Image (cartoon, helix red, strand yellow):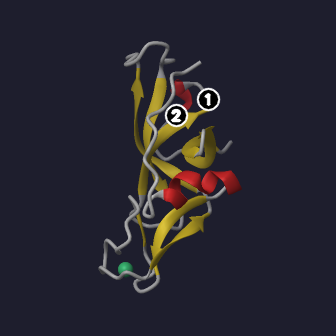
Amino acid sequence: MNPPRPIPRLDAENRAFWTGGAEGELRLMHCEDCKSFFHPPRLVCRNCLSEKVAPKAVEGTGVVDTFTVNYQAWMPNLEVPFVIARVAIDGAPGVFLTTNIVNCPVDDVDVDDRVRVTFEQQGDIYYPLFEKIS
Ligand SMILES: [Zn+2]
């Protein structure tokens, strides 16, 4: 059993991102003016500074852009090894999530692998992790 993940403090900016998994949705901030997605969530568009932004669900698929395998047990009971990856999110150009690739051996993960979001619930938080699409 892994130790608990650090718990983000929910606020108006990030609540949709961390709780969208309750409805099975990966929700990113989207700007109504320039039609772009951006991350991390803010109440002002990162691209055009518009305040007409709102969380919007994306498909929940993506591509492994880069990754590393962690072998160090940074905390007691932390199960190693595990994959830390940067995933490029489909339908949201320029948006990358730093996450874990789960449900497969670490040796099976490679750059350009197609992945799909899966949520790990801890209290009110749904951590978006990814698994390979086989
Ligand atoms: Zn914008």
Q: Residue 104 carries which label?
A: 1
Q: Where is residue 89 in the image (x, y as percent from the top left)?
A: 50, 58
Q: Tag 1: Cα neighbours inside 10 Å, few (<14), some, or many (≥20)?
A: few
- CA distance for labels 2 and 1: 8 Å
> Which residue lies at the image location 43% right of the left edge and 75% below the top edge?
36
In this rendering, the answer to whether 43 lies above or below 78 is: below
Q: Considering depth in this image, is 36 or 16 the residue closer to the camera? A: 16
> Which residue lies at the image location 43% right of the left edge and 40% below the top edge?
85
Residue reaching furthest to the top: 76
Amino acid type at mark 1: Cys
Say which label, 2 or 1, has the lower sequence index.
Answer: 1
Amino acid type at mark 2: Val
Q: Name the quarter where the C terminus is drawn.
A: top right
Q: Name the quarter where the N terminus is drawn.
A: top right
Residue 72 seen in the current view: yes
> Which residue lies at the image location 58% right of the left edge and 53% below the top edge?
19
In this rendering, the answer to whether 42 lies above or below 118 is: below
Q: Position of residue 52 (x, y in %)?
A: 43, 82
Q: Which mark is residue 109?
A: 2
In this rendering, the answer to whether 96 lies above or below 133 is: below
> Is 115 on the left or on the right of 65, as rendered?
right
> Is 79 on the left or on the right of 9, as rendered?
right
Pointer 2 with pointer 1, Cβ within 8 A: yes
Which quarter holds ligand 1? Answer: bottom left
**Foreground disc of the pair 2, 1:** 1
Tell me the quarter of the picture where residue 122 sits. Answer: top right
Q: Where is residue 116 in the image (x, y as percent from the top left)?
A: 62, 49
